[in-house]
Image (cartoon, rainbow, N blue to C red):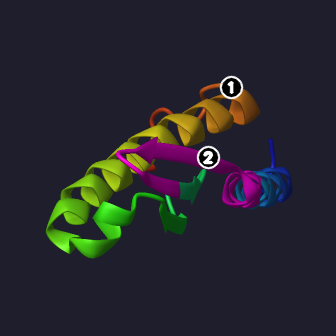
Amino acid sequence: MNIYDMVKQLKNFQQGFEEVKESLRLRKEILEKSGVELVFNGLGEVVDIEVKDEELRKDWNKLKPVLIDLINQAQDISRDIAKEEFNRRFGGLLGGLGLGF
């Protein structure tokens, strides 16, 4: 393989990586616990938080640990989703690259 082919493969890899990231950004997941709904994407970014329970709206000290728990769950799920998507797309080639998934 010559350097031109290697550069071409790298560019294709970068494009594929960006496509997967965009796909994950568009994916929406919802967690609900104790009257709080958390909407997040496949990258672990919190998109929306809705408090459905009136009592929780009145008392932030009750709400805070629920939100922390939901955000942590969202991040764990997002990491799993990203691993699955990258493995599906790249067939496990990323295992040794240390991308932090």
Q: Secondary structure at mark 1?
A: loop
Which is nearer the eye, 23 or 90?
23
Q: Report the number of discs.
A: 2
Give the image location of residue 84, x and y in percent. Answer: 61, 30
Q: Position of residue 29 (x, y in %)?
A: 61, 46
Q: Residue furthest front?
A: 54
Which quadrant of the figure contains the C terminus?
A: top left
Q: Position of residue 38 (x, y in %)?
A: 49, 56
Q: Earlier in the sequence, mark 1 or mark 2?
A: 2
Which residue position is annotated with label 2? 29
Left or right: 23 in relation to 57: right
Residue at left offset 21%, top offset 71%: 59
Quickly name the residue at label 1: 91
Let me know if residue 19 appears in the view.
yes
Single out the mark in the foreground, 1 or 2. Answer: 2
Residue at x 22% of width, y 65% of height = 64
The alpha-carbon separation of the residues under discs 1 and 2 comes to 24 Å
Residue 7 part of the magenta-drawn span: no
Q: Which quadrant would residue 8 be assigned to in this image?
A: bottom right
Q: Which residues are magenta?
A: 20-38
37 in magenta: yes
User: Going 37% across and 43% down the picture, which residue do you hit?
Assistant: 73
Q: Which mark is residue 81?
A: none
Label 1: how many Cα within 10 Å (few below 14, some 14–19, many 20+): few
Lateral position of residue 54 relative to residue 84, left or right: left
Q: Secondary structure at mark 2?
A: strand
Three-letter amino acid code at the position of disc 2: Glu
The answer to whether one can see residue 100 in this image is no
Q: In this picture, is 28 found above or below 101?
A: below
